[in-house]
Image (cartoon, helix red, strand yellow):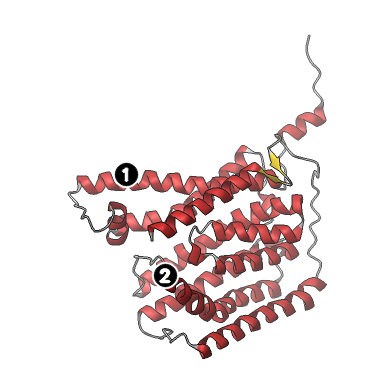
Amino acid sequence: MEKNIDIKDFKKSVAKRNFYNTNDAGKVFLFAILIPFVASLVFSYIGYAIARGAGISFGEEESWINTLYNNYLWFTIPYALISQISFICLFFVYNKVNHISFKACKVKFKKINPIVAVVSAVFGILFVICLFGLIEGCFGTLFDMWGIASNDNPIPLNNFGWYVFYIIFFALVPAICEELIFRGVIFNGLKRGIGSIWAIILSSLLFALIHQNINQFIYPFIMGSVFAILMNKTNNLIYPILMHFFNNFTTVTIQYLMNIVAINLDLPVNAVYVIVSLILAAVIGVLFFLFYFFYLRKRDFSDSATEEANYVGKEPIFIGKLPLTLYAGMAISVIFIVINIIAG
């Protein structure tokens, strides 16, 4: 005897949903931690096998992986891009497997406000300029005193060709890949479960943790909060991507100009330096506050797309309002940070 099929239930089972939930946020963050880690391990041992086959010898002063990373660009470049490649693959595969529409991440080219787009780009530049002294000088010096060294990128940045390479692969690509994961999936998913304010704070914390380095924690947390605030108000991922790109672009440009000795920002960190850095940080904070309250708040960026508010999918294990996968991802991130500190 044939079983009757409910047409509505069938359509719901095959139709793509156009939103994320907290379950999605937890799983995607956990995958964003584990997939690059596994991919890095696999690539490292493949690189080691290639190096041994090519007759490359390794000394006792540093590990074989550090030798490859610091001295051989054929290894360094792909290794440095593994996280971004993992993020973009994770985004598309996760959406495909879970029947989620691209609309869920809220990339809306047709609804771009030119003023917000331009101001987002300008703030991306200004945040670097105004926070450079506080982050690189003040906190950088503090970390150095604690014996926590920053990780230098061995990929050269001393001519225009490498500068273009950095703009593409260390400014544009991360801006797109990281925003799709952290503001597109994670923030939007958390917002549905715990509300805007907590989603801004938690998604920014996760964004800082993903960097897996204590001296790269403060600035990503600050900028993650700004990106999330912008995303929360505008409901359009284009603006955080623009701000993120110009933020990265400015950082790369400053480093390039320093490397070719066009500018010198290696100033002594004294009382005047600290005071000026704090003033600049306060200025950019006030400017963004004014932009938000006197422009963004007066504009209607509401999303008219309909959503199934009660959709959950497979029941995950929750602790409070958050899925277990999110706690697991945070715990693994902290473990990696501690390992990096110990490894020096």
Q: For the residue marked with disc 1, what is the amino acid?
A: Ile
Q: For the residue marked with disc 2, what is the amino acid?
A: Val
| Residue in the picture at 57% in, 77% down | 125
> Is 276 rendered above or below residue 32?
below
| Residue in the picture at 30% in, 48% down | 47
In front of the other: 293 or 119: 293
Secondary element at tag 2: helix
> Is 186 rendered above or below residue 232?
above
| Residue in the picture at 61% in, 77% down | 122
**First in sequence: mark 1 vs mark 2:** 1
**Label 2 crowd bin: few (<14), some (14–19), many (20+), radius 10 Å:** some
Q: Furthest residue to the bottom?
A: 272
What x and y, as percent, mark residue 129?
Answer: 54, 80
Secondary element at tag 1: helix
What x and y, as percent, mark residue 324?
Answer: 64, 42
**Label 1 crowd bin: few (<14), some (14–19), many (20+), radius 10 Å:** few
Residue 91 visible in rendering = no
Which residue lies under the disc numbered 1?
A: 46
Which residue lies under the disc numbered 2?
A: 164
User: From the viewer's perspective, is the residue at label 1 or at label 2 nearer?
Assistant: 1
